[in-house]
Image (spheres, rainbow, N blue to C red):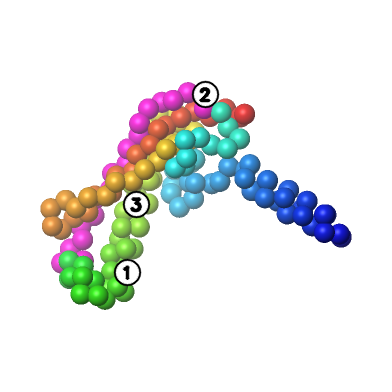
Amino acid sequence: MDRSDATKGARDASTAQRTAPPDMSAGNDAPVCIATTDGIAGAHIAMTLGVVVGIAIRSRGVAGNIMAGLDALGNGSALDEYRDLLAACRGEALTRMGRAAEELGAAAVIGVRFNCAEVGHEMVEVVAYGTAVVLQDA
């Protein structure tokens, strides 16, 4: 195979990766496609159903507060457990948002964003929100 064939093959593979819509629903239980972009590659938005929200609240507990204090003192590895808690909380918020979209009849949620806040001193709230849409093949 000469160099031009190798370049063409790489270009074709690159184009295939860009045109196939990614499975953004991996890691959540909802069968809708979830994307941070304002559209889904290879699909046309047929109908906008509105904003959907998923909220998850978890208690950080005394151990989490102690870990946060240790991290403030420079022990970066002390927060691994807290990071895992937040990752699980984000996953739960995405799942709840996806289920809300599914209840509306959506095929996807686009423009997804997160917001995170402390609730009191012991809890953390993660909100996932986006726009539920019905898709049509482009």
Residue found farthest to the front: 3
Q: Is residue 39 left or right of residue 52?
A: right
Q: Residues within 10 Å of mark 3 (few under 14, many from 20)?
A: many
Which dot marks residue 46? 2
Q: Give the image location of residue 25, x and y in percent.
A: 48, 46
Which dot marks residue 90? 3
Look at the picture and state if 82 lies above or below 27: below
Q: Quadrant of the N terminus?
A: bottom right
Q: Give the image location of residue 68, x and y in percent.
A: 21, 67
Look at the picture and state if 63 lies above or below 111: below
Q: Residue at x 46, y 30 (%)?
A: 133
Sequence-wise first label, 3 or 1:
1
* Magenta extent: 45-64
Question: Can the viewer see residue 10?
Answer: yes
Distance from disc 2 to disc 3, alpha carbons, whole Å, reads 28 Å
In terms of secondary structure, where does tag 3 sit?
helix
Residue found farthest to the right: 1
Q: Give the image location of residue 41, x and y in percent.
A: 57, 37
Residue type at the position of mark 1: Asp
